[in-house]
Image: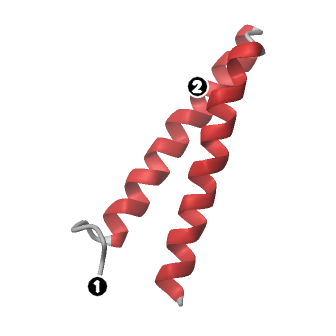
Amino acid sequence: MNSYPFSKRLMIITYSTSLVVMMGYALWLYKMGSYQSLWVPAFVTLVLLARISHEGIKRSG
């Protein structure tokens, strides 16, 4: 049984959308030269990538 009431497909779409937004924000910060502010979006991007891969593994296995 799921620990949350939302479907896995909806969660993957939500995480993927968040990933695209965070990657865009991190790229924008990089292009603007704000390297000290880049750490948080870069870390959140890695966390979202891990969560999407975890959802994919749970779905297939």
Tell me if mark 1 has few (under 14), some (14-19) or many (20+) residues whose alpha carbon lies within 10 angstroms of its own: few
Name the residue type under label 2.
Tyr
Question: Which residue is the extreme one toward the left?
Answer: 5
Tell me if mark 2 has few (under 14), some (14-19) or many (20+) residues whose alpha carbon lies within 10 angstroms of its own: some
The residue singled out by tag 2 in the image is 25
Query: How far across and how far down the image is residue 6, in percent?
Result: 25, 66
As drawn, the label of residue 1 is 1
| Residue depicted at x 54% and y 44% | 19
Instruction: Classify residue 23 as left or right of residue 6.
Output: right
Q: Quadrant of the N terminus?
A: bottom left
- Judge depth for marks 1 and 2 and give the one in front: 1
| Residue depicted at x 55% and y 60% | 51
Query: How far across and how far down the image is residue 39, in percent?
Result: 71, 27
Disc 1, SS: loop
Q: CA distance from mark 1 to mark 2?
A: 35 Å
| Residue depicted at x 67% and y 17% | 29
Query: How far across and how far down the image is residue 25, in percent?
Result: 58, 25
